[in-house]
Amino acid sequence: MVRLLHLSDIHLGSSLIHGRLNPATGLNTRLEDFIAALTFCIDRAIAEPVDLVLFGGDAFPDAMPPPLVQEAFAQQFRRLADAQIPTVLLVGNHDQHAHGQGGASLAIYRTLGVPGFIVGDQLETHLIITRSGPIQVVTLPWLNRSALLTKPETEGLGLVEVKQLFMERLATTIDTAIHQLDATIPTVLLAHLMADTAEFGEERSLNVGKGFIVPLSLLAQPEFDYVALGHVHRHQVLWTSPPVIYPGSIERVDFGEEGETKGFILAEINKTATTWEFCPIPSRPFLTLDVDLTTITDDPQAHLLQLIEHAPIGQAIVRLRYRLRSEQTALIDLASLHGALALAHTFSIHPELVTQLPRARLPKLGLGQTITPLAALDLYLEQRPDLDGLASELRIAATTLLHPQAPGELAAPMQTALRLDLPEAYGP
Ligand SMILES: [Mn+2]
């Protein structure tokens, strides 16, 4: 029986936008949160101690982490080398350079020959001798089409045919690996991929089309005693015999993971029966406060303040979203909202202006007609569905320009909103 700790999707150095500078250390507090979560995992591995640590991929937001981040990662994993706990680092999509060319951020651990460390950057079976006996680990890193298919093979094929050919090739490759296994030794498949039955948060759905979706039947094979997955940030169990498990990310990368409990898996691998448990990691809460003020006839500011007062915002990363009518904007005092939210770790404010004019009654541009600048903006936005995501910010900016309030009063939330709407490259 081999005891192992399975963690995944560390993404060290992401979510910085939700942090602030810690004046005591000079570090972004979110980097510190992520380091604390990783430290929690490594502490447990050493305290047990486990016989083996499996990392399911996506160490950093990209393949070129800054030295400070690279070092923080190495400091934690080095503790496993010191404790003589064998460790497999699997390469995820975020660990590869573009198109899989030019190596991966984790390959340095092989180059340095860190004792007991294995870098899984290809489909390969590793026989690892642990304190509690041997175990076979089949590594299946994030695969691009070029890993299994050659250019001439895919020439002239459509996307559907390429995907089908890729899946056939993957099935054959896994099959070959399975046939070469020693059936008397416990075996784990460690894979970074999107399984067809996996569920993920709404904000991640945009990333689905990027890679290949692997059928669960390819993974849940009886030759494996445990299937350790990485890639999807929400912890989930896809199959029980053998267990096919995403531990999920160790900290929240963005608001898409707001409601998720973070953790890792401790498992006992056996040829007869594998047992496992999910171990939660203390993590900083994300909290969305959402309110529609358009139906409110009295003071909208009082509603916002009451909402904030009754919410558990202490130490949380908070976003306040409210919908309001244009004539209500003058009733919102942003300075006092900022004051009320000050207990949060960090916060952002996202007002959404709801236009009251029914589209059909909008005046059309034409000779001899005059329309207000804001109506003109609405007409313009109607013609530009590609700007939908920016429409509310543009309306607020225009309102501010046309009806100036106290200097800078609307400038601050605009910045916050725009800053947080930047696409984050930390998808699964
Ligand atoms: Mn991934």
Image (cartoon, rainbow, N blue to C red):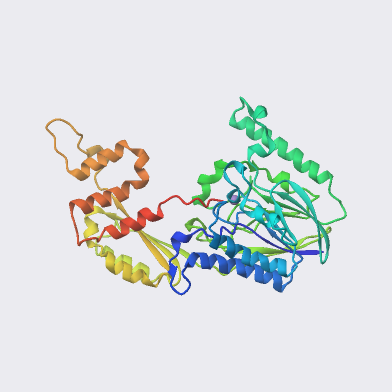
**In which quadrant of the rendered view does residue 228 lie?**
bottom right
**In which quadrant of the rendered view does residue 149 lie?**
top right
Q: Position of residue 207 (x, y in %)?
A: 53, 45
Residue 240 vs residue 407: left or right?
right
**In which quadrant of the rendered view does residue 209 lie?**
top right
Q: Quadrant of the N terminus?
A: bottom right
Q: Position of residue 285 (x, y in %)?
A: 49, 66
Residue 342 vs residue 252: left or right?
left
Q: Is residue 56 visible?
A: no
Q: Position of residue 60 (x, y in %)?
A: 57, 56
Task: Say if 177 sits above or below 152 in the image.
Answer: below
Q: How many marks?
A: 0
Q: Position of residue 58 (x, y in %)?
A: 60, 54
- Specify the farthest residue to the top: 156
- Specify the farthest residue to the left: 368
Residue 290 vs residue 224: left or right?
left
Task: Identify the residue at image location x=11%, y=32%.
Answer: 368
Task: Identify the residue at image location x=59%, y=41%.
Answer: 99
Choose between 179 and 374: the one closer to the eye: 179
- Specify the farthest residue to the front: 112
Choose between 231 and 205: the one closer to the eye: 231
Task: Identify the residue at image location x=56%, y=66%.
Answer: 35
Q: Is residue 90 visible?
A: yes
